[in-house]
Amino acid sequence: MNLHVVILAAGQGTRMRSALPKVLHPVAGKPMLEHVIDGARALLPEGIHVVIGHGAEQVRERLESADLNWVLQTEQLGTGHAVAQALPHITGADQVLVLYGDVPLIRVETLRALVDQAGSQALGLLTVLMQDPTGYGRIIRDDQGRVRAIVEQKDASAEQLLINEGNTGIMVLPGARAADWLNSLSNHNAQGEYYLTDVVELAVAGGVPVEVAQAQDELEVLGANNRLQLAVLERGWQAREAERLMTKGASLADPARLDVRGEVSIGRDISIDVNVVLEGRVVIEDGVIIESNCVIRDSVIKAGSVIKAFSHLDGAEVGEQCDVGPYARLRPGTRLLTGAKVGNFVETKKTVLGAGSKINHLSYVGDTEVGSSANIGAGTITCNYDGVNKFMTRIGDGAFIGSNTALVAPVSVGAMATTAAGSTITQDVPDNTLGVARARQRNVEGWKRPARQAKPE
């Protein structure tokens, strides 16, 4: 069927106490509205129409995309009025699905069930059973259990307030009736607004069936009007991701102390300690161990590797059976081949570290190609930047770089070559050669240390 999605995202969000529009506040590292848009895209609709108002330019600039139609609501006169603003952009729709830009945890499976149940002839409602429905519109049913109306909390009687079936606001309008219903809404209510929920009574009066689907839980349909609610959404998202990862084969030391802010795919027998943050696109293969307090962003970690505590990986590829950290920083363009090791307080950038090669501690290696089985000593620096341009360093198979060596790029150290500790290497070192580039030591006999001078009285 021809499905169009309307996402309401025009609210100011004054209770957020922020200059940032409410729908741009992040959950799991991306704006709430982006989560909702991604859910809408998964339904493969004919069109996605985002109704914006407060901070419209910020919202549009942040999430601009060719598949989104932006609709400006200049006055916020209620949800019914907001959906009506999108109608001129919708043609030939069999169904119009209404979503909310501050409800980011809605499951695609739930939306599919609602759309399928409603079809093109019925009005579809998504409801939720709640322990405390305060603030939600109540679903009014007749003796046969059929939905007859939705009453907003401020308009509800004492008896109606006892109902625990709440309206989520998410609904599917039959395309053939959407315009007539929306144009028939009245603002004669406690808020003086055009309620989208009033279309239920219009449907009942017109003999249109009202089909109901229910959300799996309250969290799925929870919105965020303030930062406290935003924090609840964040923990809800993280709990859901932790459950997914454990189901797929990860052991989490504490599921409540893992943050996923992107798309993570994993193999089997993964071990993740506490306070680990996974951002962007992360791939973790079989048997990987990630110790505590690591941040891993847009990286691949292949089978059997260990990422030790407090390490940061950003745009890195770690090969099989590698050892990283603790306190290592792998920056974009870093590739570790099988069995490579990067130790504590080592930073790499745009570097290939060959199979079995080691940078054990206290070094910076950038814009470098390292062969296999090489050893780079403590305090080594590749001097790759002259203030304007970057230059490459190449280190051959089996090379040994002595501690506190400065490699001034562009420079090459050949296979099985060695640099003496403390050298500043400015010329190529051929294969099987020792490169020494340091001042000769001179010992001064009879030298006396400076004495502390007495302070004047």
Image (spheres, rainbow, N blue to C red):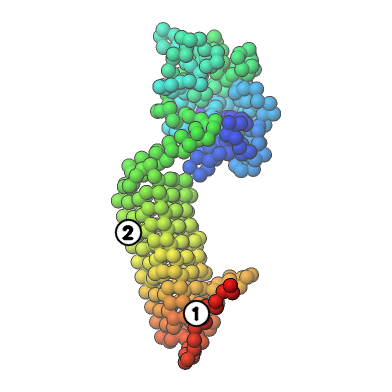
Look at 43% across and 77% down and name the residue there.
403
Look at 49% across and 83% down and name the residue there.
449
Residue behind mark 1? 412
Most foreground residue, 176 or 370? 370
* Distance between the alpha carbons at the discs numbered 2 and 1: 32 Å
Residue type at the position of mark 1: Ser
The x and y percentages for residue 397 are: 40, 77
216 shown above or below 379 = above
The x and y percentages for residue 139 are: 47, 16
The x and y percentages for residue 150 are: 51, 15
> How many numbered marks does the figure carry?
2
Residue behind mark 2? 304
Q: Considering the numbered disc 1 on the image, is that residue within a helix, a strand or a loop?
A: strand
189 shown above or below 266 = above
Q: Considering the numbered disc 2 on the image, is that residue within a helix, a strand or a loop?
A: loop
Look at 42% across and 40% down and name the residue there.
238
Residue type at the position of mark 2: Gly
Q: Is residue 368 visible?
A: yes
Most foreground residue, 118 or 275? 275
Q: Is residue 38 visible?
A: no
